[in-house]
Amino acid sequence: MGVADRRKRERAARRDAILKAARGVLISRGVRGTTTKEIAEHCELSEATLFFYFQSKDEILLSLIFESIDFWAQGLDAIAAKQLPSARLLDAIWEFHEAVYVEHPEYFVVSVFLAQPQVLENVSPEVKDKIARSSGDNFRRLARLLEQTDDTAPGSVLADLIWSLFLGLTISQASRANLGHGRPSQGRHVRTRAFDVIKRGLGRASASPASGGDAAAAEPVAGAEDGRP
C-alpha cells in the first residue's frame, strides 16, 4: 500500500470515528445540545483536529443525514428483493422501521432536526436539493412497496401514514420519558399496538367494496400517485 492510499484510509477511518462519536452525543444531548467540542472529546481529539475533517457541526449532521438516506435505501431495496407476499410485506416494512430505530436511533433524531425552522439556512441550495431528491427516492421506494399491501389507497398516502405514525410515536414516547412519565422500554409495545390497529383498518378497507360499502372510498386520491417526496 502506498503512502497516499494509507493516508486516504486513515482519513476515512478518522471521519468514521468522528461520526460514531457524533451519533452517541446526538442520542444523549439532542441536536441543540450537541457541540463539536463534546464530539471531539468522545473520540479523543482536539476540537482543532476535528475541524480538519469536518468544518462545522452542520457538516457532521449533513453527513449523518446522507448516511441515513443511504441506509434506508439499502434496507428498502433488500425488502423489495425478497418479493414477499402482500400479507407478509407490511409486517416486514414495519419490522425494518423497528430495526433501524434499534440500530440507529440517531437517524430519527436528524429527521426531526430537518423539520425545525432555519436549521438549513447555512446549507447551499444544491445540498438541500440533493437531500430532497434522495429522500424523495426513498419515499417512492416505500410507496411502491406499500402499494403491494393494499389496493384501496395510493402508495404515497400509505407511505406518509406509516412513516408519520412511527416517527410520531417515537417522539411522543421520548417526550413522556423526558417528563418522567413512561419508560423507554414501553415504546415498542405502544408502537406494536398502534401498528395492529393500522393493519386492522387496512383489512377493513380492502373488504369494504366487496361487501357493498361505499365504492368511492376505495378510489385513489386525485394527484396522490405523483410520487412526491
Image (cartoon, rainbow, N blue to C red):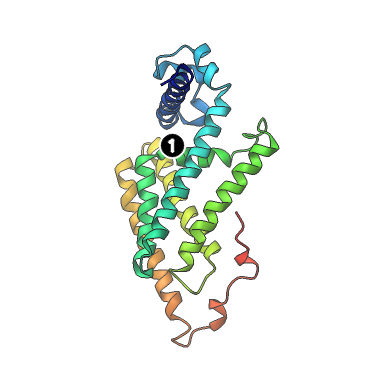
Q: Nearer the viewer, residue 208 or 67?
A: 67
- Quadrant showing the N terminus: top left
Q: Residue at x 49, y 35 (%)?
A: 64
- Whether residue 207 is visible, yes or no, is yes
Q: Nearer the viewer, residue 216 or 24?
A: 24
140 lies above or below 222: above
Q: Residue at x 60, y 42 (%)?
A: 131
Badge 1: how crowded within 10 Å, few (<14), some, or many (20+)?
Answer: many
Q: Position of residue 226 (x, y in %)?
A: 63, 63
Q: State left or right for residue 75 relative to residue 55.
A: left
Q: Residue at x 40, y 73 (%)?
A: 203
207 lies above or below 115: below
Q: State left or right for residue 224 relative to residue 201.
A: right
State how many labels appear.
Answer: 1
The residue under label 1 is 106
114 lies above or below 11: below
Amino acid type at mark 1: Glu
Quarter of the figure with residue 192:
bottom left
Quarter of the figure with residue 149:
bottom left
- Quadrant showing the C terminus: bottom right
Q: Position of residue 32 (x, y in %)?
A: 53, 28
Q: Residue at x 52, y 65 (%)?
A: 155
Q: State left or right for residue 137 relative to residue 118.
A: left
